[in-house]
Amino acid sequence: MAGLDQIAGIHFLHPSIGFLALALVMAFLSNERYMTWRWLLLAPPVLAIFSVMSLTFGPDGPRELATLHYLGQTLSLGRVDALSLVFANVFAIQALIGFIYALHVADRGQHMAACLYIAGGFGCVFAGDYITLFIFWELMSIGSVFLIWLRRTQAATAAGFRYFLFHIFGGLFVLAGLLLRHADLGTFAFTAVSPEAARYYDYIILIGFLVNAACVPLHAWLPDAYPEATVTGAVFMSAFTTKTAVYVLARGYAGFEVLAIGGLVMCLYGVFYATIENNARRILSYHIVSQVGYMVCGIGIGTAMTLDGACAHAYAHILYKGLLFMGAGCLLYSAGTAKLTELGGLASRLPLVMICYMVGAVSISGMPLFNGFVSKTMTITGAAEAHRTWLALGMELAAVGTFLSVGIKLPYFAFWSKPTSTVELKPIPWNMYAGMIISSLLCLGIGIFPQTLYGLLPFPTDYVPYTPWHVLQACLILGFTGLGFYLMRKIIPPHASRNLDFDMLYRLIGRGFVKLVSVPAAAIDNIWTDVYEKVGLKALIEAGFGTSIFDVKVIDGVLDGSARGVREVGGAGVARSQTGRLQDYLAAAVSIGLAIFAAVWFLG
């Protein structure tokens, strides 16, 4: 295997290797000794950060650092350029934060699943061909579904099964598209597709990518599965699946108009459902759909600024969305529920959770001084400069819904809506607080020093977020949204119910399929029953009558006749021969023996 090219004095080490090695090692460990081996969890993400940072300061330009020749194909495992590095950078950081947050978990199965999942994400980011991409793409699906199943509840089992079916569906589209593409072009290279030159197989691959991006109407797996995942599993899942999809869309499908329109639909659709939801983790899941919509829309517009905005927003989103899921996970871990109708009055009892959650809330809402402001405004400004006014206005409208649901509604009903809380709380481990504090500092630090993020972006753009208009615009949106919630706070409380969206369509399709199969089968069964009653049953009865006659006349006749013959003819003689005297039996035996000897003598 090639790929040990030297970069700035440091050899390239694929970040996936450490996670795969740890997953293998943990297969031989025991849950009872987790206090000893739990510190191993930090080694792969630290190694990944070291590897990615060494690449960041290497020479400019795309580089091919790791290839594998297998079955006549050259698999590209280490394509490194500015686009892959910005995603790899935040993946490594979030992996470390996620494992710090999960240090208290004694279930090695959860950690093994997380390692496989993260390894798949890194593999996709550095993949230079579709075969490598597909292998790691499916590895992500396998790892993530176990992060759901390992919660070990009936709801998690069902949600994980639906999640897996969706990703099998998406993976099959990717596989079919790459095979058709190879048949036409003779290559598996993962390169950009021009919108004007796109062929049918390019759109087949695009559908597979859009499944992982949770593009409406292919999104229902996300708000269905993420709320049912383990407390720590949801933190990992919020970072990798959809953002890996954003990466491959930016890599291969920039400038596709369908993405611009579809991204705006995601922005508005996600915030609408988040506003009416009750479960905190389900609210945050719908906001993944909405926030990824900004990124997809920016990719679809396809200018340098909107592509940079999509990458910057993916970076910021991984940090603040992970922070939000960590806060919601603390509520679930401590109070035993994430439903807003069962929470409230927790601000004084969980003050640090409340503070860290609010950092994530104002970050996702685009408040100045936080990372969401410096990334979201770049995409919106890029849309306006590209004369896509309706797209820019739609994204601004979605920002209102974001602050309303995640920035105000969720924390209000979770922390302040009740004067006191009577819920029994479970102590929160120190490492969960540590993970939230690190994420909070990063969200604030990038917001104050945006060039730390802008310096990683793949395209040269000159964007200044802190202009008087940008700051004033953000403050006006947030201020009027907060005022509106205050005036309506008593008439928009959450309701203890689940809202169905496109999963209702999937249920109808499932029921229709069952009817499609069962109705013809029932009709055939009814016809067969009639035929059997009129023809088959009569024939069976006649056959039974014939066999009974044969049994009586033939079989019983032979056996009964034999028995009578023995009884009537030989029975008396046999009875007389049974004298009961030993000398008679000896004489008979000798006589029989002499007769046999004489026969052999004379015949021989």
Image: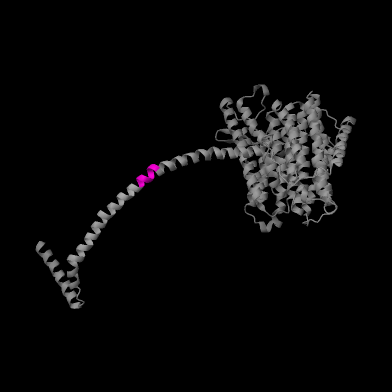
Q: Main secondary structure of the magenta part?
A: helix
Q: Where does the image place residue 78, in percent across and percent down from the top left?
A: 67, 36
Q: Which residues are magenta?
A: 534-540
Relative to 33, is 129 above or below? above
Q: In the displayed image of the protein, which residue is found farthest to the left?
A: 602
Say which quarter of the image contains residue 558: bottom left
Q: Is residue 89 visible?
A: no
Q: Which of 94 and 483 lies nearest the eye of the viewer?
A: 483
Residue at figure coordinates x 73%, y 43% from the top left: 282
Q: Position of residue 307 (x, y in %)?
A: 75, 29
Q: Give percent across and percent down for residue 90.
A: 75, 39
* Residue 562 screen position, x and y as percent: 22, 60
Q: Decide which of 126, 545 is in the foreground and name it.
A: 545
Q: Quadrant of the C terminus?
A: bottom left
For the N terminus, which image quadrant? top right
The residue most toward the top is: 196
